[in-house]
Image: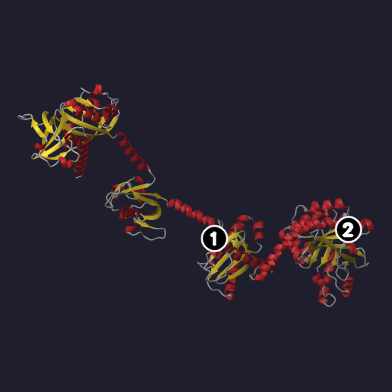
Amino acid sequence: MEADALAKVQLAELAERYRRLVELSADATCVHENSVITYANPAALSLFGARTTAEVVGRPVTDFVVAEQDRGEDTEGKPLETVVKRVDGSTFVVETVSVRTGSATQVVIREVAGRLAEAAQAELVSQASDAIVAVTADGVVTSWNPAAASVYGWAATEAVGRPVREVLGTDPDPAAIRLAGGVAHQTHHHREGAPLSVRVSAAEMNDGYLLVCTDETARRRAEQHYRTVVAALDEGVLVVGPKGLIESVNPAASRILGVPADELIGVPCSSLVLFDESGRQLPEDELPSISTRRTGVTHNGLVLRLRRRDGRDVWVALTSRLLDPDDPAGVSVVTSFTDITERRAISARLAHDATHDPLTRLANRTLVLDRLDRRDRAGSTTVLFLDLDKFKIINDSLGHSVGDQVLRIVGERLRRATAATDVVGRFGGDEFVVVTTGVLDEAEVRSRAGHLRSVLAEPISVHGRELHVDASIGIVGVAAGDRRSAEDLLRDADIAMYQAKALGRGRYEFFDVSLRERMQRRLRMEQDLRDAVHSGQLWPAYQPVVDLHTGEMVGVEALLRWTHPDHGAVSPAEFIPLAEESELINEIGKFVLRDTTREVAALRASRGLDLSLKVNVSVRQLEDPQLVPAVRDVLATTGLPPSALCLEVTESALMRDAAAAGEVLAALRSLGVLLAIDDFGTGYSSLAQLRQLTLDTLKIDRSFITGIAESRDAAAIVASIIAMAHAVGLTVVAEGVETAEELALLRQLGCDQAQGYHLGRPLPAAELFAQ
């Protein structure tokens, strides 16, 4: 059937080419049947002097033939001279050739004078783009147009007279072509041997055949290149015919679909099972190839999920367009698609990595913020901000690998302790966030916070070590209609968490607006404190230290004061913790040390005073490697004797890392300065521990001194401290002496020195020494 169809198509092409040749021919050609003219080409109309076809067609032949040479027998196909008459009645002599085709007769009419028709026909042949070759019945070339010379490389003078098989590189066998329908595809050869893909049309003439040879080598080569390229593509390509059946399949399409190509040919395109990104299966009328064939609309870059025969799903980027958009009747569709399964998986992993913490695989800050921004503002939400207490000690003492394992375990515990709809995130370091939704009253939130703390408090075993962690939790309740942004909510939860830490750690606190205001003041004060260091707002006050045996002032303790330009005097209880948390304490400590040593050294020199200076050193200053060089420098530049400088360190600072503190104190002691333990009794140390440190003085905390005159127990404790301190050679100083009774009792108990408001308030040096 396919061969018959091809033959019909080729025959139709030949008929069309013949019709156009007759229409364009310079020879007058007409057809008559039963002596009535049924067709006349433009040249015939011109010859007869007619302006329209109606003036010729339908009229008897005798209206135009005046006299005809006696034909005799067997004159068909032979030229005869005939006198014809034009429409206007004029006559002239022509040469006619008649050929019968069934009941009709085709007549070619040529004017005898000048043989103009032959010249015109020769010109037409010479200008043709196809090779036109006339051959005898025996296959000898009798005519060879310029196009033939260009296609085959033989000049006309060389080709005419040669066997056609020699100049075409093969025997075209025109008789066989005629029997096969008049058109054939053959392989000819150029004079130099190159193969040529040629479509040959053959027509029979009186003494042979006329061959019209169309060189299709370039087109066939382009088609072959196209097929090779399509076969090599990683992109799958299907061509779907007018009936919706798959007509061609490239290897990539077969591979992506998981079906051999021969099993796809002839299969309806509707057999492909496709889903959109929401998971909905596309109905048949929405399949891209069917939609394009129905509407002509191109679909570009559709992302679809395709289910293969083996049940595996692949993601594809698919394009569907008409095979020939310029053909209004074109209903064939080409569908191309690329397997993006791996690319989509990589993209999903990258998107996950961009929104999740790499250590715990919990949501990161970006994802938590996004979920909070997209929360249902008609409902309620609770944000719990958790910070692990003393996690830095685990990290610093056991190493980051242990710390990372602890964080992974904490993250997993939080995930298991929360609902599937909750968002659990890690913000880096040891900070975690839990976001819950739904109506939660305060009692339920407290219960959840307590549950989270208890889950985290369970022992953690890492590398054979049993560790314990706790958390401080800040809580923010978000009611329906709350207009705070995600950043605002996290900020407020963070503030509440810091409040929980400030109140003793291992607890939870709810956020309120006053808490935010205090935090904002804290932030402003911290910035103002940074400016105060360099603007002269900080200054030292001195509190007298009195020898209880002589009653003489033997020393002064330098105490820092801050006069704020807007707020006036700021309490040390507010700004010293700020300095320690922000690490400004190191810079402030150096400022105090420098100014007070210079001032006291000048007083000692100008007034001949034998006065010691006591300066507090914070735990952060002990960790500062520049502390010892700074002390050495001020002693050298101010001229204060090292024995006149006593550096006071709190008991809790010494107990935080006794070994490290001992090294720093030994280095300071090597400079000749004196060392004191401050606030003794608050850090739960023992004198046995203190003996390992090179100390000179022990200062009893004011909490033991207040009310000592009225409390036998307090007096007994102080007496014991004094006795033990003296036993190890330490000078004892009592802090916070407020009354004469307290002073008298301390003197009775054998305390060496004392300070407090009863003995003198902190004052600027000029006021203190003016008294």
Taking the image as shown, residue 350 lies to the left or right of residue 737, namely left
Mark 2 neighbour class, 10 Å CA radius: few under 14, some 14 to 19, many 20 or more: many
Asked if 76 appears above or below 343 in the picture, the reply is above
Which image quadrant is residue 523 in? bottom right
Q: Foreground residue, 400 or 589? A: 589
* Residue 367 circle label: 1
Taking the image as shown, residue 680 lies to the left or right of residue 137, namely right
Q: Is residue 468 visible?
A: no
Amino acid at dot 1: Leu
Which image quadrant is residue 271 in? bottom left
Marks 2 and 1, the one that precedes in the sequence: 1
**In the rendered image, which quarter contains the C terminus?**
bottom right
Residue placed under numbered mark 2 in the picture: 600
Mark 1 neighbour class, 10 Å CA radius: few under 14, some 14 to 19, many 20 or more: some
**In the rendered image, which quarter contains the N terminus?**
top left
Residue at figure coordinates x 85%, y 53% from the top left: 635
Residue at figure coordinates x 89%, y 54% from the top left: 641
Which image quadrant is residue 41 in? top left
Residue 614 in the image: x percent, y percent? 84, 61
Residue 265 in the image: x percent, y percent? 28, 49
Residue 328 in the image: x percent, y percent? 30, 49
Amino acid at dot 2: Val
| Dot 2 and dot 1 residues touching (CB under 8 Å) | no
Q: Is residue 68 visible?
A: yes
Q: Say what secondary structure mark 2 lies in.
A: helix
Asked if 103 appears above or below 156 in the picture, the reply is below
Q: Foreground residue, 57 or 422? A: 57
Q: Could you give the CA–CA distance between mark 2 and mark 1, rounded to whole angstroms?
A: 58 Å
Residue 339 in the image: x percent, y percent? 40, 50
